[in-house]
């Protein structure tokens, strides 16, 4: 089962991806994580990407697809993957389709998490995290029991906020999403892969709606070439 999650910042993609991972035993692939992991390997592709990043340029679509191609050949992706953060443009979506076709694979479902932008600004601008254990909180929706102590691990003075988790930055990120990423929606709608989910419901309800979509799909299960090659 190969899935793409689409949604603006604060839509809950990360939370839902983890739930899908647990339910379907597939692997979430974040473009940022893959880039960092590839650079750390120090191999030829990793060195090439490091040069691009160090120069301040954006990683090209071709390089990004190559990274994804290598990653999905690994054994832990045998049951499938969830792409979060890629593709962002129609050109990337077309390149992804071409690469998957060469592996006898395909995207089975595209989940768009639809949200109210005003509520997203409130949701994102109020969140903070424990830097020790990663537990997430929110000023309004999930405040810590104590102002300076993590409920989960008990760490003191460990709460941090992302510098761009403020109303102005969130609005800018939403605008960028609408201009850059939203145009790929018709691409997948034309392929009859796009499923819209109400992201303003609570986490469990959103997860239930996503599960209904995924369970309702008649999914092909193509054999992963990585396994045929003995990797």
Image (cartoon, rainbow, N blue to C red):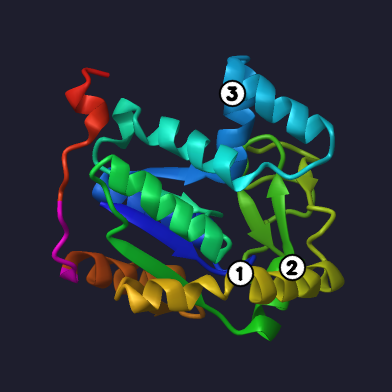
How far is the residue under mark 2 from the one under mark 3? 29 Å
Magenta residue check for 80: no
Q: Which residue is mark 1?
A: 8
- Quadrant location of the C terminus in the rendered image: top left
Q: Quadrant of residue 205?
A: bottom left
Task: Write the start and end of the magenta stretch as one range.
Answer: 216-220
Q: Which residue is mark 3?
A: 45
Residues at discs 3 and 1 in contact (Cβ within 8 Å): no
Question: In the rendered image of this protein, does residue 100 appear above or below residue 180?
Answer: above
Is 210 left, or right, of 124 in this rendering?
A: left
**Number of residues whose C-alpha sits closer than 10 Å to that of mark 2, classed few (under 14), some (14–19) or many (20 or more):** some
Residue 172 visible in rendering: yes
| Residue 1 placement (x, y as % from top left) | 25, 51
First-in-chain label (2 vs 1): 1
Residues at discs 2 and 3 in contact (Cβ within 8 Å): no
* Secondary structure at numbered mark 1: loop
| Residue 67 placement (x, y as % from top left) | 51, 34
| Residue 163 placement (x, y as % from top left) | 85, 54
Question: In the rendered image of this protein, does residue 144 appear above or below residue 193?
Answer: above
Q: Which residue is mark 2?
A: 173
How far is the residue under mark 3 from the one under mark 1? 30 Å
């Amino acid at each position: 089962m190969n899935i793409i999650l689409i949604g603006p910042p604060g839509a809950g993609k990360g939370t839902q991806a983890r739930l899908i991972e647990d339910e379907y035993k597939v692997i979430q692939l974040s473009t940022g994580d893959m880039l960092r992991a590839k650079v750390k390997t120090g191999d030829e592709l990793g060195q090439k990407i490091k040069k691009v990043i160090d120069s301040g340029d954006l990683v090209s679509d071709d390089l990004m697809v190559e990274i994804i191609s290598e990653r999905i050949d690994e054994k832990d992706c045998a049951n499938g993957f969830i792409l979060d953060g890629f593709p962002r443009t129609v050109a990337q979506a077309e390149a992804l389709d071409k690469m998957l076709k060469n592996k006898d694979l395909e995207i089975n479902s595209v989940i768009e998490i639809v949200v109210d932008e005003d509520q997203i600004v409130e949701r994102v601008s109020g969140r903070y995290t424990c830097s020790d254990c990663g537990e997430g909180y929110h000023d309004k929706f999930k405040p810590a029991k104590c102002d300076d102590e993590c409920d989960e691990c008990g760490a003191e003075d460990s709460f941090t906020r992302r510098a761009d988790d403020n109303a102005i930055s969130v609005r800018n990120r939403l605008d960028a999403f609408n201009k850059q990423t939203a145009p790929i929606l018709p691409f997948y709608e034309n392929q009859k892969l796009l499923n819209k989910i109400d992201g303003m419901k609570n986490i469990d309800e959103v997860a239930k709606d996503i599960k209904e979509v995924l369970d309702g799909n008649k999914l092909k299960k193509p054999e992963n070439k990585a396994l045929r090659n003995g990797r």
